[in-house]
Image: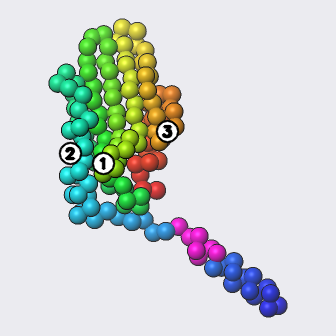
Amino acid sequence: MKHTLVACVLFVLSICVNAQQPRRKATLEQQKMCYDQAQKAAKDLAMGDDWSFEWTSHYNARANVCFVRVNQMRLKLPETTISVMVRDAFENEDVAMYFGVSNSQTNETSVRHCTVQQITCKDHVEFQTLLKKVWQEE
C-alpha cells in the first residue's frame, strides 16, 4: 500500500513538473529594445538602391531572441528576384534565408537558396512554414 501511494505521488509530481510552462509575453521595454536593434541590423542587410526594402522586428519572449526579418525584391523584367533574410538581431546570426527568382514569361520560380535553421527547404511555402515555428513563441 505504501509503495502504491509513493508511486501515485511521484506520478502526480511528474505531471506537474512536465506541465507546459505559462506563455511569457514580451514587455514594452523588450519590444522597444528589439525594435531599435533590429533597425540597426536591417540596414546592414540592405542589398542596394535597385531593391525594394522592408523590415520588421519580433521579440520571442520564450526564447529570449530578437529577430529581424528583411524582405527585398528587385524587378528586372522578365525576372523578379525575392530575398528574405531572418537574423538574430543581437547575435548577428542568420536564422533563415530564402532567395528565389520568378520569371513572368514562363511563370516559373527558381529557388536559389532556402534554409531555416540549417534545414533546407524546397520553396517559399515550406520556408514560411518552417520559419513560423521559429518566429512564434509556441
Q: Are marks 2 and 1 in contact (CB under 8 Å)?
A: yes
Residue assigned mark 3: 118
Residue 58 seen: no
Q: Residues within 10 Å of mark 3 (few under 14, many from 20)?
A: few
Label 2, label 1: how many angstroms apart (C-alpha)?
8 Å
Specify the quadrant that holds the N terminus: bottom right
Relative to 33, residue 117 above or below: above
Q: Which residues are magenta?
A: 14-20
- Image x and y of residue 75, in percent: 25, 18
Q: Are marks 3 and 1 in contact (CB under 8 Å)?
A: no
- Image x and y of residue 41, in percent: 25, 43
- Magenta span contains residue 19: yes
Q: Secondary structure at mark 2?
A: helix
Residue 16 lies in what quarter of the image? Answer: bottom right
In the drawing, what numbered circle is on residue 89? 1
- Image x and y of residue 47, in percent: 24, 28
Horizontal side, residue 46 vs residue 117: left or right = left
Residue 11 lies in what quarter of the image? Answer: bottom right
Q: Secondary structure at mark 1?
A: loop
